[in-house]
Image (cartoon, rainbow, N blue to C red):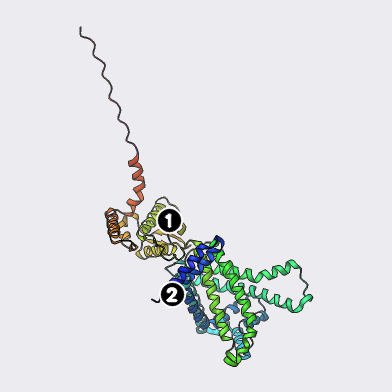
């Protein structure tokens, strides 16, 4: 019963999405996927994690910005934008903490605690996006260190660019005609914040999930999500002044509900953008009410992946990529990730250091086809009892056909089939004996 409401919501959204014209279909179906994945609950968890690690993340990011040469006034403005002037003591404490953050004053224990808070936040983001894209494995520790520090280095820079454009726009509104800028430069200045938000969202969608996301799909999500986040930030700044009137109710914490709502909606925007990118990448939208699901049989997909990897190994070709594994197949990305994860756990495959490519770890002749087949459970048939009995018998015969075969046999099967299909050479006709002449 608890899942009936989200399931009904996603199915109705799917109906609306399929009825709309094609340009509007993908955003609506992405909202249905957002609901089916319960991304709104993941956004709430991310909000909680963000609030716990907010000050350490800000301190770490701003210390890096100071190292890049950004002025103190810009850093102060960024804090004032997200913590309005309702409590000057909060401003002073936060600014003092941020100014004092450096490796020399923190010490080993303090720096380790700060990095752990940042690590916890980024790990939560990765798990949320992995669920959206169907990735079953998290990064290795080595990749987490390299990727997370790249994100920590570039994300503050992008955010600073966004906020710098907003700052200059507000200064221009204050100065009016004194600000001497050409129309083209003014237009470019107005585009800086929203383009920065789009770039930031697209980059997060590509980097954070532990799966390969195409730039085209990430651009879809980045454009929509970045635009939503920019307008959320604009509305947050605009409503700060009006919401401050609620000090009679909340006292010094009058801005806290608005800030928490903004953080929650920002995470919702990111997860919605990820759902949009997942659909553009090939993930199926939620089904309509009564629509039959036809999931891919993971056993067949496993044999397909292993056979393709064996063929590439025999021909000394590059390792198998995710796109090659699903090419020509109607397979959901989440099922593909499940199969790849299980084959790696079993020790049949390993992912290359570059990521996104897989190669065999054992010789194909050492892998029994039945063992790979039995690693997975077939999808449950949705049909009448009589038809289900027939399907079960077909599956039993499929398994029996694999008895005694290895992966090497499956790799060589097409070659043997071509040899068997060749017509047998015609036997030479026996030479005719010369006719005997008439007897004397």
Q: Is residue 266 magenta?
A: no
Left or right, residue 186 beside residue 96: right
Label 2 belongs to which residue? 5
Left or right, residue 76 beside residue 378: right
Residue at 70% x, 70% y is 189
Query: What is the number of the mark on residue 304?
Result: none
Residue 84, given in percent of the width and then of the height, sits at 63, 85
Q: Which residues are magenta?
A: 422-428
Residue 150, given in percent of the width and then of the height, sits at 55, 71
Question: Dot 1, crowdedness within 10 Å: few (<14), some or many (≥20)?
Answer: few
Residue at 34% x, 44% y is 417
Residue 363, given in percent of the width and then of the height, sits at 35, 56
Label 1 belongs to which residue? 329
Number of callouts in the render? 2
Q: Nearer the viewer, residue 58 or 295?
A: 295
Q: Quadrant of the N terminus?
A: bottom left
Marks 1,2: beta carbons within 8 A: no
Q: Quadrant of residue 388?
A: bottom left
Task: Point out the tag, 1 or 2, that comes first from the N-terminus.
Answer: 2
Q: Main secondary structure of the magenta part?
A: loop
């Amino acid at each position: 019963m608890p899942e009936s409401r989200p399931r009904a919501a996603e199915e109705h959204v799917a109906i609306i999405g399929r009825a709309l014209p094609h340009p509007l279909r993908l955003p609506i179906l992405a909202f249905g996927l957002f609901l089916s994945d319960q991304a709104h609950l993941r956004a709430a968890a991310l909000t909680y994690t963000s609030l716990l690690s907010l000050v350490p993340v800000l301190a770490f990011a701003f210390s890096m910005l100071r190292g890049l040469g950004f002025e103190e006034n810009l850093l102060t403005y960024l804090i004032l934008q997200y913590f309005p002037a309702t409590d000057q003591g909060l401003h002073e404490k936060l600014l003092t903490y941020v100014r004092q953050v450096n490796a020399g004053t923190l010490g080993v224990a303090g720096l380790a605690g700060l990095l752990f808070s940042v690590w916890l936040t980024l790990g939560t983001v990765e798990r949320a996006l992995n669920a959206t894209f169907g990735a079953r494995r998290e990064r290795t520790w080595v990749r987490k260190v390299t990727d997370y520090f790249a994100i920590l280095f570039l994300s503050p820079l992008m955010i600073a660019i966004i906020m710098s454009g907003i700052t200059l726009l507000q200064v221009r509104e204050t100065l009016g005609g004194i600000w001497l800028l050409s129309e083209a430069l003014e237009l470019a200045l107005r585009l800086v914040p929203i383009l920065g938000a789009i770039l930031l969202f697209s980059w997060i969608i590509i980097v954070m999930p532990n799966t390969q996301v195409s730039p085209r799909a990430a651009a879809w999500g980045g454009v929509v999500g970045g635009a939503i986040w920019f307008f959320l930030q604009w509305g947050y700044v605009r409503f700060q002044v009006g919401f401050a009137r609620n000090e009679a109710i909340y006292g010094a914490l009058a801005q806290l509900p608005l800030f928490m709502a903004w953080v929650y909606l920002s995470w919702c925007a990111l997860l919605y953008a990820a759902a949009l990118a997942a659909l553009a990448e090939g993930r199926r939208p939620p089904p309509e009410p009564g629509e039959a699901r036809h999931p891919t049989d993971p056993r067949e997909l496993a044999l397909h992946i292993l056979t393709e990897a064996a063929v590439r190994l025999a021909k000394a070709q590059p390792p198998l990529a995710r796109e090659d594994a699903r090419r020509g197949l109607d397979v959901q990305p989440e099922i593909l990730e499940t199969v790849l994860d299980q084959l790696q756990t079993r020790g049949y495959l390993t992912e290359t250091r570059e990521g996104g490519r897989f190669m065999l770890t054992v010789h194909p002749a050492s892998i029994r086809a039945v063992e790979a087949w039995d690693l997975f459970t077939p999808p449950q048939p949705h049909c009448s009892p009589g038809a289900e009995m027939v399907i079960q018998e077909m599956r039993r015969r499929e398994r029996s056909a694999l008895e005694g075969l290895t992966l090497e046999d499956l790799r060589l099967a097409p070659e043997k089939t071509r040899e068997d299909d060749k017509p047998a050479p015609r036997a030479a006709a026996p030479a005719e004996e010369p006719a005997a002449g008439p007897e004397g």
